[in-house]
Amino acid sequence: MWALKHFKKSPPPSPEYDKPWRPMDWKTNRQTFMATINDFESGNKDIDTLRVLLHGPQGAGKSSFFNSVNTALEGRITTRALAQSAFTGRSFTLECNTYKIKKKAGSFYPFSFTDIAGIHDDSSTSIRTEDIRKLLSGHIKDGYTFNSAKTIDEDDQKYNRNPALKDRIHCLVGVLPASTVSLMDGEVIKQMKAVREKARDLGIPQTVIITKVDEACPLVHEDLKKIYTSKKIKEKMEACSYTLGVPISCIYPVKNYHRERATDATMDVLILDALQNIVNFASDYVEDQVSSG
């Protein structure tokens, strides 16, 4: 009885590490990122715009990520890409939309984002992976309406028979929600891997954006700056790395702008950190392609 009465339960394990597992300077990085991105040039006179493709399951936050990048760069809430929630129905068609972002001086940043339909667990209603492969190679022009029933053919007016380097995708960015990354449907994983394999064959660099981090971790929900001390977020990133085969160093957790009515410096730091790396990878790819002939 004495032993039971005086027995003390062990405290629950801490949800965070003592030190950040990825360093981040929250105080100065926003200004540093903005200065670097504003000064960035593609490095090739024939390719003034680096092309970034966003892909992933429906509802992962692809359109919201572009809107968040646009918001962080413009310093105000923007909603240029129409963000969607869950899809219902048996068939759909959606356009291939490419967005550029204006600088305050009136010129454009030297990169663009291409937003496409989300991948579904039902291949009969999902965007066709063959179309995404052709988009990676530069065969599909902006404005093409994707059709889940059939892939684009060479007679389509939106088909580019002879794509140049400037028409290709220069960086493939997968977008996945942290809250459900461990529960991804097998068919979605299969389709995403098929796209990744095509990008690999073309030498196109790949990164992953992990969204909805605040929904996956109460610690981060309360304080976004704890994202790199959170054991839960690191666990989600490791699960993503294992599932898709993307190195953790190329995975970036962010919180997209969604309900906010004003910009947030901490959110911007994470978004701009991801953007800077994406653009650098795309630029490296173009340089490698040009130097290899």
Image (spheres, rainbow, N blue to C red):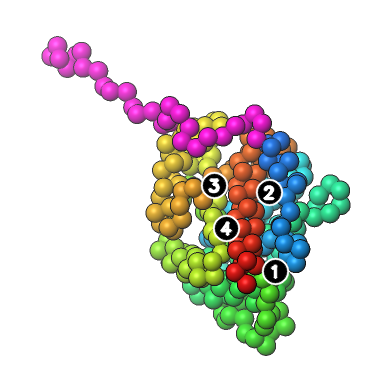
Counting residues from the start of the chain, the first of labels 4 and 1 encountered is 1
Q: Kindly identify the residue that appears in the image at 65 percent across and 67 percent down.
A: 290
Q: Which of the numbered marks, if any, corresponds to residue 252?
A: 3
Mark 2 surroundings within 10 Å by alpha-carbon count, few (fewer than 14), some (14 through 19), many (20 or more): many
Q: Which residues are magenta?
A: 1-29
Q: Which residue is mark 2?
A: 69
Q: Secondary structure at mark 1?
A: helix
Query: Is 137 displayed left or right of 197 in the figure?
Result: right
Helix, strand or loop: magenta stretch? loop
Q: Is residue 6 magenta?
A: yes
Mark 3 surroundings within 10 Å by alpha-carbon count, few (fewer than 14), some (14 through 19), many (20 or more): many
Q: Kindly identify the residue that appears in the image at 64 percent across and 38 percent down.
A: 269
Between tags 4 and 1, which lies in front? 1
Counting residues from the start of the chain, the first of labels 3 and 2 encountered is 2
Instruction: Kindly check if marks 1 and 3 are in contact, taking CB atoms under 8 A apart as contact.
Output: no
Horizontal and vertical percent position of residue 1: 13, 14
Query: Is 121 displayed left or right of 277 in the figure?
Result: left
Horizontal and vertical percent position of residue 128: 54, 74
- Eyeballing the image, is 239 above or below 202? above
Horizontal and vertical percent position of residue 101: 76, 54
Counting residues from the start of the chain, the first of labels 2 and 4 encountered is 2
* Observer-nearest of 80 and 86: 80
Q: Secondary structure at mark 2?
A: helix
Q: Mark 2 belongs to which amino acid? A: Val
Counting residues from the start of the chain, the first of labels 4 and 3 encountered is 4
Image quadrant for the C terminus?
bottom right
Counting residues from the start of the chain, the first of labels 1 and 2 encountered is 2
Q: Which residue is mark 1?
A: 166
Q: Which of the numbered marks, if any, corresponds to residue 173?
A: 4
Horizontal and vertical percent position of residue 39: 75, 47
Q: Mark 1 belongs to which amino acid? A: Lys
